[in-house]
Amino acid sequence: MKAVVYLPVEDKTQWWVEMLQSLLPGWEVTSMDDPGDPASVDFAVVWRPRTGDLAQFPNLRAIVSIGAGIDHVLADKELPAGVPIIRTVGTDLTQRMREYVALHVLRHHRDMPRQLQAQAEADWHAIVVPVAPNRTVGVMGLGNLGAAAAQTLAGLGFDTRGWSKSHKEIDGVTCFAGTEGLDAFLDGCEILVNLLPLTDETRGILSASLFAKLPKEACVINCARGPHLVDEDLLAALDGGQVKQATLDVFHQEPLPADHPFWNHRKITVTPHVASQIDAGTGGRLIAANLLEFAKTGTCNDVADAARGY
Ligand SMILES: NC(=O)c1ccc[n+]([C@@H]2O[C@H](COP(=O)([O-])OP(=O)(O)OC[C@H]3O[C@@H](n4cnc5c(N)ncnc54)[C@H](OP(=O)(O)O)[C@@H]3O)[C@@H](O)[C@H]2O)c1
């Protein structure tokens, strides 16, 4: 079997080549920059490939996304049709997202930004907030990561809701589904967490019209993809007080440009796409296991549904 590896944006291709080679004895693992005969390549392991990169391989059996999302692969308008796309997911990724969501929901719940501001002013300012069962939090997207995040929030005692495309049953979580369920989900949702995949349906969903359906002074956490958010609408909602605070882990352009207004906004916390960044060792083992399984059986657990976009 032969796999090529390609991470054009992050320049870590060679490192991944060596790691996967060590995990796949008997396989040939090369960089996409030096693939040999393109017809001999069975698998491509990629993060943000460029348009046309994958079209050069006529016999690809599968494309592996180094990450849970496949939007960066589907963005290639010349993507070879019908080649399965394998996501990289696992308990490690889910655990990290649970931690990130719990941290930032609790931070907004306890009004930590205001508390830290008081400390900076040597102001003994006691902020008393409702207990978690009296705080309504909502998670958009109830897949691997969203369902786990919602369960974690419910476990902390929050009045927890979730929203997905098809209806779900999750212990301790009030579930809403479909466009017809969105307004009811948003109504009263004081802290909103986005864990949707990026698709044509969800691009720009975090917009002025959505913010207007949240209670005044809601908090917004986006840890899915940057293009879910209409940046200008968030800035206007923060200025107008409709949104009180936001935590953003993902951005239209990454790294976030140094002159972007989000960096220094006093109501925004920026983290550099680390909500659930898998460590490369764990990611490598998951990818190698999926490649071995796919090579043997022609499929594996983590094959995405490319037609629906996630
Ligand atoms: N910041 C980070 O470090 C980081 C790390 C990993 C992933 N992510 C992001 O997190 C996203 C979610 O990951 P995941 O593994 O949980 O995804 P997933 O398993 O594919 O789940 C997606 C969820 O979103 C729902 N959904 C999709 N389209 C919808 C729509 N139009 N309306 C309502 N609900 C919709 C799906 O509903 P159904 O269940 O009904 O289909 C499903 O519950 C990824 O796509 C990626 O963008 C971020």
Image: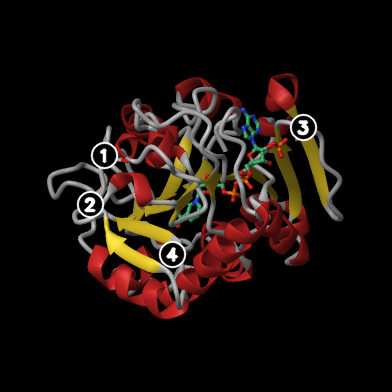
> Answer yes or no: do the residues labelled 2 and 1 have beta carbons within 8 Å?
yes
Cβ of disc 4 within 8 Å of ligand 1? yes
Q: Distance between the residues labelled 4 and 1?
A: 21 Å
Seen at 45% across and 23% down, the residue is 208
Mark closer to the chain start, 1 or 3: 1
What residue type is disc 3 on?
Ser
Residue 135 pos. (x, y %):
70, 52
Q: How far apart are marks 2 and 1 (CA)?
A: 8 Å
| 170 or 269, nearer to the observer | 170
Disc 2: which residue:
8
Cβ of disc 3 within 8 Å of ligand 1? yes
Provide the secondary structure element on which disc 4 rests: loop
Q: In this view, does 27 lie above or below 83?
A: below
Mark 3 neighbour density, 10 Å: few (under 14) some (14–19) many (20 or more): few
Seen at 22% across and 52% down, the residue is 9
In this orientation, does residue 255 appear?
A: yes
Residue 91 pos. (x, y %):
63, 69
User: Quadrant holding ligand 1?
Assistant: top right
